[in-house]
Amino acid sequence: MFGFEIFVIVVVLLVILTIIAGIKIVPQGYNYTVERFGRYMRTLTPGLAIIIPFIDRIGHKINMMELVLAVPSQEIITKDNAMVQVDGVAFYQILDAAQASYEVNNLENATLNLTMTNIRTVMGSMDLDELLSQRDEINHRLLKVVDDATQTWGVKVTRVEIKDINPPRDLVDAMGRQMKAEREKRSEILIAEGMRQSEILKAEGEKQGQILSAEGRREAAFRDAEAREREAEAEARATQMVSDAIASGNLQAINYFVANNYIDALKELAKAPNQKVLMLPVEAASVIGAIGGIADITREAFGGGGDNPQAPATRPRGSVPSS
């Protein structure tokens, strides 16, 4: 009986070990591949799974979560023969555990080398200025190339990003001088444009001022012409009145006409700029007598002795008879 009990215990232990060997628990975020006699059979998803003990075995444990792959720094020669140091980062996710396990050996290393090679290819076909200013375009091209190449591996590359682009120090200094020259050029252009606008506005202001000045002169000329016209009309009426008085035989009117013209002539002589001393080769008493005649005409015009228009002209007091 003792030997039989030992046999039973051994059989129970073997059954328990067999059951344990056939039960597999797959954690969340992982897939396991099952191999039977070295051949791929199926893929175990997260949860509880059962395999045939001692016949089936777990081949690869694949992480199905998105992974980050650091791309180390490398030297790249651009299209214009500039050497730069470039590094980056790639994000990828395994979609098919079987393909990732059996289509490529060492998936991470293969993805890394593929990414580095395509970085050199894409960035080597561009100028330095394009590298520094078109990172989005570089990332987009790299993502397309790498993702297309890794589809047969059951991998989806979600993003490829260039982190740093480091040109040589002397090239950085040259770029700084170029940028400074460009900024100074733009500054001078803006200053010249400002001066141009200022000159244009100044010219426009002068133009408007000349237009307004011309308008003012035209209005003043119109006013002067109107004033001269009215003065001429008054002169004509006065001349007509004097002519009528002369025609009627009024000697005071003749004296007024002569005295008025005489005084105007003296006034013009006095206003001449080149006359400092005025010589009068005439008798001042005759002028005074003419002025007296003007006074007589005024009295007659206002009823002070206009009964006898044919009476001889009276000599003013203090007048000197002409020779």
Image: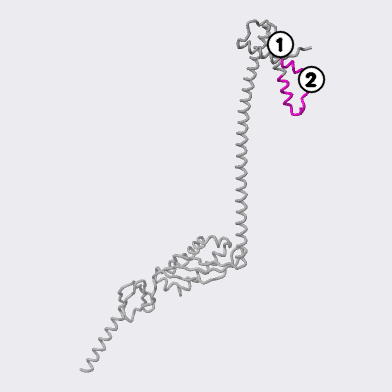
Task: Decide: few, some or many residues near mark 2? Use Cα within 10 Å; few <14, some 14-19, many ≥20.
Answer: few
Q: Nearer the viewer, residue 251 or 85?
A: 251
Q: Position of residue 223 (x, y in %)?
A: 61, 25
Mark 1 or 2: in front is 1
Q: Residue furthest bottom?
A: 2
Q: Quadrant of residue 234 in the image?
A: top right
Amino acid at the residue labelled 1: Arg
Colour basis: one colour
The quadrant the C terminus occupies is top right
Q: Position of residue 304 (x, y in %)?
A: 62, 10
Q: Quadrant of residue 9 in the image?
A: bottom left
In this view, 47 is above or below 206: below
In this view, 100 is above or below 234: below
- Range of the magenta residues? 263-289
Say which residue label 2 marks.
281
Q: Determine whether, in the image, residue 144 is placed left or right of residue 219.
A: left
Task: Decide: few, some or many residues near mark 1? Use Cα within 10 Å; few <14, some 14-19, many ≥20.
Answer: few
Give me the residue at 29% from left, 81% from top: 20
Helix, strand or loop at disc 1? loop
Q: Is residue 108 magenta?
A: no
* First along the sequence among labels 1 and 2: 2
Amino acid at the residue labelled 2: Pro
Give me the residue at 61% from left, 42% from top: 202
Q: How many marks?
A: 2
Say which residue label 1 marks.
315
State the separation of the CA atoms marked 1 and 2. 22 Å
